[in-house]
Image (cartoon, rainbow, N blue to C red):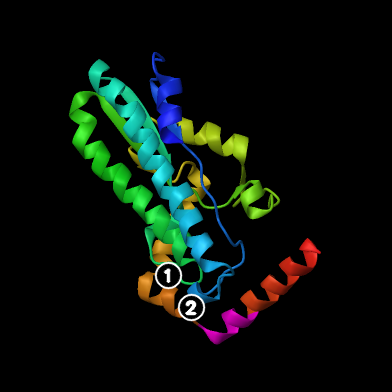
Amino acid sequence: MYQAIEDNLKGMEIGILVNNVGMLVFFNPTRFLDMPNIDKAIMDTISCNMLSLVQMTRIVLPQMVERKKGLVINLSSEVGNRPFPMSIIYSSSKRFVDFFSRGLHAEYKSLGITVQCVMPLFVSTDMIHNLRTNIFVKSASDYARDALNTVGYTNRTSGCLSHALQSFALALLMPDPVFEFVLSLKTLEDVFEKLRQKDEKMKK
């Protein structure tokens, strides 16, 4: 597939690459071994969230290096900032995006190439069942506009003021040990189970 993409892009001058593809196999929190069809879930997540980003960067980056100018924007997630029990495949894949972006930026910034990692919280999209927008949840168009305004100012961003404040509050009020403890509570497992049951009913 990637060879076909590379062939079709030959001769095109690409100045900006946005790696925005991503998938969350299960919206409701699920223990690792409880994921239905776990082998497929693992491979699909890795292929979509990690492999596609690396391959598209490999395809487009050489021409940016040749021109000594280019911008690569990689979409990660706030859940990539820390271990995220009950969604570890997704959060781990987003951690990879963060590390890959930061390392790539360090390697190529001297060649005129900016690599930015965008780490949003909730944005109303199909992936999270189009949650109603509010002060915490941004619409896709509003978020994209705000995030683009950060280009040139930082190579790692929450994308908008609302999400930056939420990220800061989470880090301040719930450091990793507290966060992991809260998500491991039995009461939360019961809540997650009810969410799963509700989701299954909605699908019927």
Residue depicted at 46% across the width and 57% down the height: 43
Considering depth in this image, is 60 or 15 the residue closer to the camera? Answer: 60
Q: What's the distance in space between the residues labelled 2 and 1, CA to CA?
A: 9 Å
Is residue 131 positioned above or below 187 on the image?
above
Tag 2 and tag 1, C-beta contact below 8 Å: yes
The x and y percentages for residue 16 are: 41, 24
Considering depth in this image, is 116 or 170 the residue closer to the camera? Answer: 116
Considering depth in this image, is 102 or 56 the residue closer to the camera? Answer: 56
Majority SS type along the magenta span: helix
The x and y percentages for residue 90 are: 47, 59
Residue depicted at 55% across the width and 56% down the height: 24
Q: Residues within 10 Å of mark 2 (few under 14, many from 20)?
A: some
Secondary structure beneath disc 2?
helix
Which residue is tagged 2? 182
Is residue 190 positioned above or below 159 on the image?
below
The magenta-colored residue range is 185-190
Query: Which residue is at the far right?
Result: 204
Sequence-wise first label, 2 or 1: 1
Query: Which residue is at the far bottom?
Result: 186
Is residue 98 positioned above or below 9 on the image?
below
Residue 174 is labelled as: 1
Left or right for 171, reference 161? left
What's the residue type where badge 2 is placed? Val
